[in-house]
């Protein structure tokens, strides 16, 4: 019987890993619905994850604009843009109202060019904020849910610190480029 897969990365059709390819993550966090502590948690997660795949990061000032869809966020020349916001999932078509968060990435070839990270404020009262921020930041750089594990990237959302399978996933992304 094969061993359970403890990590999983986004892959192109020919098996190459999809990642940021060393480009910096430029991210903007909206202020609507987030406390200062929650915004700091998001900053900390991005600061932890970006170097693990050999890319930089830069927080952009909030521009006060309405959240864009992911396709409108990316900038092809200067890194991968990430827009972080909160929206009640019962207001999003197709979203499960009991979900905690999701990331929608937009790729060209084997590079992630943009991502949108959305948190569900209806779930803020009981979640491990640091764990969910790190989990979602892992998705931004190309980690997926492992098939069978208790990793932080698992479907059941483990807890910090990163587990061996999570670290193996980061290593696979680094090695791919």
Image: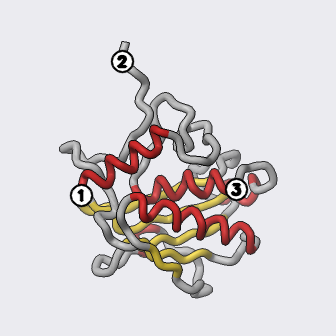
Name the N-terminal-most of marks 1 and 2: 2
- Specify few, some or many for label 2: CA neighbours under 10 Å numbering under 14, 14-19, or 20 or more: few
Q: Vertically, is 120 above or below 159?
A: below
Seen at 70% across and 56% down, the residue is: 129
110 over 82 or under it: above or below: above
Callout 3: helix, strand or loop? helix
Q: Which residue is drawn at 59% across and 70% down?
A: 43
Instruction: Say whether marks 2 and 3 touch (CB < 8 Å).
Output: no
Of labels 1 and 3, earlier in sequence is: 3
Number of other residues with Cα within 10 Å of mark 1, as a class: few under 14, some 14 to 19, many 20 or more: some
Q: Label 1, label 2: how many angstroms apart (C-alpha)?
A: 28 Å
Residue name at image x 47 percent, y 53 percent: 139
Instruction: Indicate which disc, 2 or 3, sits on the residue closer to the N terminus.
Output: 2
Dot 1: what SS? Answer: loop
Q: Residue 52 location, x and y as percent?
A: 42, 58
The disc at residue 177 is 1
**Residue to which mark 3 is pinned:** 129
Residue 99 versus residue 27: which sits nearer the camera? 27
- Give the residue pinned by disc 2: 2
């Amino acid at each position: 019987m094969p061993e359970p897969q403890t990590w999983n990365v986004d892959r192109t059709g020919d098996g190459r890993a999809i990642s940021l390819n060393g480009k910096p993550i430029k991210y903007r966090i909206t202020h609507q619905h987030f406390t200062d502590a929650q915004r700091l948690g998001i900053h900390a997660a991005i600061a932890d994850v970006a170097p693990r795949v050999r890319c930089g990061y830069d927080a952009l000032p909030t521009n006060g604009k309405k959240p864009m869809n992911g396709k409108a966020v990316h900038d092809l020349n200067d890194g991968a843009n990430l827009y972080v916001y909160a929206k009640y999932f019962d207001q999003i078509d197709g979203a499960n109202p009991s979900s905690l968060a999701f990331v929608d990435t937009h790729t060209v070839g084997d590079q992630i060019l943009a991502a949108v990270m959305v948190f569900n404020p209806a779930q803020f009262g009981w979640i491990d904020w640091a764990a969910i921020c790190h989990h979602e930041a892992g998705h931004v750089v190309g980690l997926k849910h492992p098939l069978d594990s208790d990793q932080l990237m698992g479907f059941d959302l483990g807890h910090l610190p990163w587990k061996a399978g999570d670290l193996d996933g980061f290593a696979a992304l680094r090695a791919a480029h």
